[in-house]
Image (spheres, helix red, strand yellow):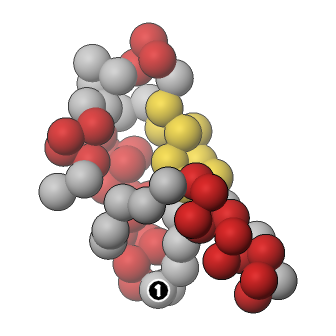
Amino acid sequence: MALVTLEQILKQARAGRYGIGAFNVANMEMIMGAVEAAEELNSPLIIQVAEGRMRYSPLPLIGR
């Protein structure tokens, strides 16, 4: 799953007239579960991480 900007993903959704799920995650396991489900459904996904949780969900690991 590729990382894209919020602007890119919302532009595509607007043009395609569909919504995108946004999920607040607290750890890497939650991120992995959300990404796995989105990949199975071939669906875009917005991952939301609170700044205080970044030590548990580092961005370099998410983009792999």
- Which residue is disc 1 drawn over? 42
Q: Is residue 26 above or below residue 46?
A: above
Which quarter of the image is occupied by the N terminus? Answer: bottom left
Instruction: Pick whichever, 47 or 5, lies toward us.
Output: 5
Q: Is residue 34 above or below residue 60?
A: below
Instruction: Tell me which residue sits at (62%, 57%) in the image.
Output: 7
* Residue 61 visible, this orientation: yes
Residue visible at 44% across and 12% down? 52
Q: Is residue 43 left or right of residue 12?
A: left
Question: Seen in the image, is 40 located left or right of residue 13?
Answer: left
Q: Is residue 28 left or right of residue 43?
A: left
Residue 38 placement (x, y as % from top left): 46, 73
For the point 18% across and 43% down, the residue is 61
Question: Which element is circle 1 on?
Answer: loop
Near mark 1 (Cα within 10 A), the count class, few <14, some 14-19 or many ≥20, is few
Q: Which residue appears at 68% of the width and 64% of the height?
A: 10
The residue type indicated by label 1 comes to Asn
Camera sees residue 20: no
Q: Is 8 located above or below residue 49 in the figure?
A: below
Percent of width and height locating residue 34: 44, 59
